[in-house]
Amino acid sequence: MESAASRQSPPGLPVPDLTPAEDQAWSALLFARRWSRGATAPLASATPVPDPLMATEGLIARSEATGWGVPPAATGEVRTLLELYLPLLPRQPMATLTLGHLGQSLDGYIATARGESCYVTGPANIRHLHCLRALADAVLVGAETVAADDPRLTTRLVPGDNPTRVILDPRRRLPVARQVFQDGAAPTLLVCAAGEGLPHRWGQAEVLAVPTAEDGRLRLEALVGELHRRGLRHLFVEGGGLTVSRFLAAGLLDRLHLAVAPVVIGEGRRGLTLPASPALGDCLRPSCRVFRLGADLLFDCETRPDPGGAGARAVTEPREANSLGAPVLSRVY
């Protein structure tokens, strides 16, 4: 985990810090995540604490029947933060969850035509990305994202361990000089198409060979299975648009976070790109919750509801509703 001194906002984009109350709730979430993976000790102590409700000072409740929940006593910004992130915690130590995220404009673009994407969404969503990384075992991105942005994929803006970084580059086009292959900030896997002559390492990253389909693309179900075998069961597919779309089209996403910013790009790189549905009734229509992240709206979509009890259940009591009746939680975090 990076030190507090290293948690800095991206240049030119002041990202809001957690308030003291949010920081307490976030610490409870980190403990609950660790507890759900089988650990029984709080983050800063070796003393076993078998009851997560006691360990989190009553901020988080849990039952075998319904999973994680927000106690009625939690209110305001604490309740908002918990309601967003509790569904991402596994109910059982061996449960799996795959989450995708995209940040896009009102007209559905994640970047301009020349590839400019910093920053389509606002600072609150940038911090949200770091929170999602901190709750994940592994963060996955495609080669185009690394080529365009040279991201570090760490948890610089919030407390929490850096996830394993998984870079999907079937034809090994990315140069070894990219940050994720050199900085040593977290374990890193470079995923390539299986074949002869693959190196064992690419900079500081381990090279992982994955079989391909007839079209030459990586078999994503094989990749997910290999990551699970390595103990990486909570996967965060951070981008880009084609990578998230492929996971969604393959039926491998349990949830999708779609942040929509109040900006119109006009023409550019699309977010989700899926095969056309023959009729409106055949279209994916997931159950969604809506949260406000600063000026952006975040749609939390259940694209594969409760696959075998993998997710968590947060007790949500909408305090404000839009015209469609969806809950809108208006705290900025």
Image: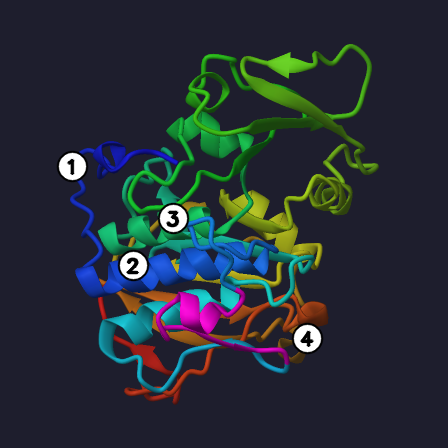
* Residue 274 seen: no
Say whether disc 2 or disc 3 marks the residue closer to the N-terminus. Answer: 3
Q: Secondary structure at mark 1?
A: loop
The amino acid marked with disc number 2 is Ala
Which of the two discs, 4 and 1, sits closer to the camera?
1
Q: Residue at x 64, y 44 (%)?
A: 232
Which of the two discs, 1 and 2, sits closer to the camera?
1
Q: Quadrant of the N terminus?
A: top left
- Please name the residue that numbered disc 1 is placed on: 12
Q: Is residue 161 above or below residue 131?
A: above
Which of the two discs, 4 and 3, sits closer to the camera?
3
The amino acid marked with disc number 1 is Gly
- Please name the residue that numbered disc 2 is placed on: 261
Residue placed most toward the observer, 228 or 252: 228
Q: Quadrant of residue 249?
A: bottom right
Say whether disc 3 or disc 1 marks the residue closer to the N-terminus. Answer: 1
Q: Is residue 137 left or right of residue 7?
A: right
Q: Are marks 3 and 1 in contact (CB under 8 Å)?
A: no
The amino acid marked with disc number 3 is Ala
Q: Position of residue 282 (x, y in %)?
A: 68, 75
- Please name the residue that numbered disc 4 is placed on: 282
Q: Is residue 117 above or below residue 129?
A: above
